[in-house]
Each structure stands twice: as structure tokens, then as C-alpha cells.
Image (spheres, grey):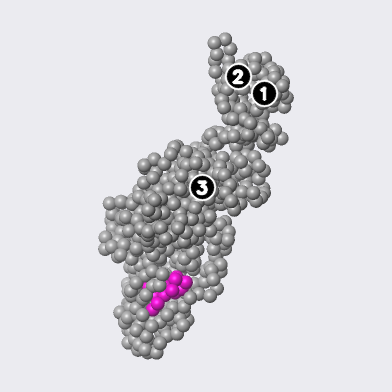
Amino acid sequence: MSGRSEMPAYEGSLVDEPVRGHLNEVEIEALRLLFWRYAGQPFRLEQANVAAAGSMSGADVRAALPVLLRSGEIAAVRKAWGEKLYYIPLDRQLDLWKTWGYTELREQNPARVELEREAKSGLALDLFRALTWIAGNGLRMTAKGTIHQKERSKLEDRIVLKAEDIAGLQLNYPHPDVYSPALAVVMDLLLALGLIAKERAVWRTDVPGMAAWLSLDVPAMNFVLLREILQRYVPADVGLQHVALRLTAPDLKRGVWYSVEELLGSLQDQGLLGAGGGDLSPERAAWTEGWLEALCGFGWMELGRHPEDGLMFRWLIDRETSSPEVLPSPQSSPSVKEKLIVQPDFELLVPPDVPFTVRFELEFCAELASSGMMSVYRLTRAGLEQAGRLGRTPQEILQLLEEHSAGVPAPVRDSLLQWGREIGRTTLTEVKLLSCADSEAADRIADLASLAGKLERIGPLHFLVTSESEAEVIKILDSERLAPAQRGTSVPDDPVLPKLTEIEVTRSNDKEQIVQKGQGWIYKGADLHFYEQETRPPDVDELFPGLSEIPVMWWKELRRYHASTARELIERALAWSAKLMLQIGGDTVVCVPLAIVEGESDWLVRVRQVPSSAAQEKDISEKEVQLSPRDWQAIRLILPAGIRK
């Protein structure tokens, strides 16, 4: 994605603090220029020249790439045919605001802002409710490879996000005639985070992935989801990427109103919208408004209207953790979790900090009455019977409530115990019939001690085998040369519902263990995830092809050359986008050659003069001039310091 740029410091920014101590000033400036020009968009080696500005030449920017790549400030991928693409990773983009800062935005008077669009309950809750449905039911596929209509409807009913919330993002995804944009977003994120997987013709939950995800609290989930949204749903447009990153920067305080027009104007003043190809066009403006509406739909933002200053926004969530490098682990959440409140009328009040692993169980034994900051469930006998079909007894549910609530009122306890005596007294178990061709085979099977308890003889030639024992029974029969010729291969229709409260999640702080596990359905950004990561930095021959072929004096000595030699030197500088040092009269001038121009009687070189020191910065304007070889007394090719070594 995208982010900061060449930006003036604002009061209170971190601009004057030492940052990126492993980089020198030239490398930091190269990183700033690349970010300003490309945000998170990929660029080829030669395209780094386009980012050059001020006292930096294209050669200076390119020469910094090896250090930036080794330090992790940029990354690279290699296409199948060998071409390399460089880019600034999203987490580095999100962190660059600390280095250069953004123009400070004014805090608006809340009394003058009328709320126009409220935030919804949140993307984290939508994913949770979709996950619980898939965990309990699975999603069966049609012959065309789409989810059955009835099950799509059930899933749609469980999510609060609607098509109108994300219509402005203009997302592309498979089967748009079948799936609504809201359902496509939910399925996309479930897949990208590795929370569901396809088993033949059914989508199932990935239990380890789901357990790890639901062990996070809502702020930690939002941390991951916001980065997924930035990475996957922002178009490959540098200007819009800068807009999305500026909106995300943590200097915008939670709960404070800011002007959209002022934010966009500040980016335009800093040249960040121009880096993507111009001012904010009507198409870009429409996408920006759609992005803000989507952030409301995801539960993270509210929109308002100021009578004079127009559209306003305010964040409802924090966008930064103590370390943006890592994913918050379960241990990083507060150690004291809120408790359920069990009411005598069988209602369960669920505060926002109740762990999702507990809410997961409630989804299968209680009916959801309302969701929001405080969700409300109701215990019913029908809900307990459903839980029984999924392997939960009323006694286990009572134990869950006792462990995670401030107390269970006597009427509720008594009813649960009574239901426990009435529900689940009989069980219907799926078994398979093992048939023998003759009594000799049947008697041998009955006599095998290794099969004791794994099958039951129900006649002279027949045995019952439970689904749980089937694989082991077949293995033993194989070893005795009695294996059946035809073996069942069907997948059970009913999913096995895991008890997440009993799964111990062990995870390091490496956020890659959750982020980007799968491809997902939607990807509007650069398609970098298709390519192989490249860790080898470019060598000198890639950065400056032909360097070993030129005379050393060209870049070591300031001296006079014949016009034809000077032209060769300048052509080499043009090929490398390198600077030149010229002695003109008594002055030494540094410039970037732009083109050789054929004159009437001689050739000329068009150059852009640049300051050679900080002292000259205010005195030299970056104007272009044309020079003849007769205009200078000496010339030298300037190579970046690291290359000269």
C-alpha cells in the first residue's frame, strides 16, 4: 500500500529525532523519495530514477537500494522470467510517518458536526459470526463451484456488513452474479487469514487457524484486519494509496473529528496526490468517499457533516500497537477478562471483552437476541438440544457459564440440570457394516485381539464398525490379508465442532502466522503475492552497467577533455542518471544532465543545476539550462559514495 512522503515537519512530530540509525542521510532521503513517488507500488530498477529530486540523482537513489533491501526498508520479488520488482512493504509504509510526519490537521469542534453515518458493529464480529456458522454447518458447493443459495442466505443474515457499505470500492471477485460484495469480503478475509479451507465440495473451518484467531481480542483483530484491507482493497494508484495511509496515520486521534477536505488538501500541497498522476480527479474523489464509507461499515469510523467545512470523519479505534512489527499475542491482551452476566430470565449479557472462544460456545447453545457493544443471548431448551447434536451436554454448558460468569442464578442452574436429565439419553451413531464371504474369515476376525472393542459381531458373517474405528480396523485387516475390496471414501456430512476453550494456542509474535495465509478472492493492489521473494541485492553491474569499462579518471578527477570525450562522459552520466561536476569560471557547479541537444554548429547539454551543499540549497533554483562544451573548463562524473568505494 502506500503512505508518507516529502513532508514538512509539524509541531510535535518526530522529524528531529534520530530515526533508522542503520541508514545514512542519503539512504534515508532515497527511501523518502521512493515512498513519495511509488508509495507501495512496485518499481523496476531503472524506474528508481524517476523518484530523483532536489540534490538526489537517479544514480543516488539506485545506489541506496542494496542497503535499503538488506535493512528491510524495501523488499523485492522476482518474476518467472527473472525480472525484479522492488517495493516498500506495507508495515514500513505505515511506520514512515514517524520519520517525516504529516501536516497537522485541525481538531474540529464536535458541537458543529452533525453525525451522518454511524459505524456498524464491526468486521471482527462479522467474521466471527460467519466462522461459527461454517464451523457448525459447513458450506456446501453446487456443481458450478458456488455456495448453495440457502446457505449463502443463512451466512448473509449473520453479517451486518451490507453491499452499500463497500459499493464505492469497486471490488472484483469470482461469481459477482452469485455473491454480494459484503459476503465476498467476508469470504475473502476468511480465506486470506487461513480460517477456512475447501474439502472436496464443502468449505470447512481450519481448526488450528480458527483457534489462534479467536484467541485474539477485538483490538488485535482490528490490527490485522486493517492491514489486510490496506493491502488488498486499495487500488494500484499511488495517490489513492497515499490517501489511505494518511487516513490511517496514528496522529489522527480516536474520537476526534477531522476535515476530509483539509486532509486531501494537505496531501495535494505536499505533492503526494501528484505522485500518482495529478490532482484529486472526480474518480479519485468518489473512491475516497467510498473508502470512508467502507471504514464505517467495518466498524472503525464515523462520518459527519460540518455546515461550512463539509465532510468530517473520526476514528473509533486505535491504529497503532506498541510495536507495529508484531501481531499482538494472546498474552498481550489484558489478563483480567470481563465476565458473562447470566440473568434469572435466561438472558446472557456478553460484554465486549468476553473472549471469543467463550462466545463461540454460546453461538451453539443459545439464541442471539442482539449484537453490538453488549451482545445478548438467550438460553432455550431448543438451543441446548442443538448443542447436544454438536457434542455439548447441558452439564458442560453449565460448567462453561460457571467458569466465565459472575454466577449462575438458581432457576437457570436448575433448568440446565433438568434439561441435562432429559436431553441426550439416547444416541444415534453412524456405523458401517463389515460383511464376510464365509464363516472362516468371520471367525478369524472375531478372534483377533487387536480388534477387540473396535467392532461388534451381529451375526455369523457380519460386524458393525464405528466411523471412529474404521481406519484402524482396515489397517489391521490389511495386515491379516482380510481387508475389504471396497472401502468408504465419503466425507461425513456433519462437521465435528471443536471446543476452542480446551485448545491451547501457542503462537509467537510473528504476525505472518496469521496474516496472508491464503490467496483470498479479492486483490486490487499490486499482484506481488504471485511472485517469489528476492533477497539478493543488486550488484554494481546491475546498478551501473559498464562501470568497469570507463576510465577511472572520469569520476576521480575534475579535468578538461576533448569535446568528443566529454560527450561520451555525459552520455554515460545520462545512461546512469548520474550527476556531473562542472568548473565554470571560478565556480564549481553540480548538475543533473537531462539530454544532449544538437545545435547548429555544436552539441549542447541540457542540465538541471542542483545544490552541492546545504549552504547552497536556498540560493539555487532547480532551473534547466543548456550548456556548450565551451562553457566549462573541467568536468567530472559523480558516482554515489558507496559505488566509488
Above or below for 56 versus 144: above
Q: CA distance from mark 2 to mark 1?
A: 10 Å
Quarter the C terminus occupies: top right
Determine which residue is flagged by label 1: 582
Q: Is residue 318 left or right of residue 521?
A: right
Determine which residue is flagged by label 2: 627
Q: Is residue 596 left or right of residue 413?
A: right
Q: Position of residue 498 (x, y in %)?
A: 43, 72
Circles 2 and 1 in contact, beta carbons < 8 Å? yes
In the image, what residue occupies the spot 47% across and 66% down?
A: 218
Q: Quadrant of residue 189?
A: bottom left
Q: Position of residue 515 (x, y in %)?
A: 49, 57
Instruction: Give SS at disc 1.
Output: strand
Instruction: Depth check: give the residue in front, 263 or 489.
Output: 263
Instruction: Depth check: give the residue in front, 468 or 209.
Output: 209
Magenta stretch holds residue 349: yes
Instruction: Give SS at disc 3.
Output: loop
Above or below for 150 versus 526: below
**For mark 2, does the 10 Å Cα neighbourhood hold few (<14), some (14 to 19), or many (20 or more) residues?**
some
Residue type beneath disc 1: Leu
In the image, what residue occupies the spot 59% across and 53% down?
A: 12
Q: Is residue 514 left or right of residue 565?
A: left
Magenta stretch bounds = 348-363
Q: CA distance from mark 3 to mark 1?
A: 37 Å
Instruction: Depth check: give the residue in front, 74 or 474.
Output: 74
Residue type beneath disc 2: Leu
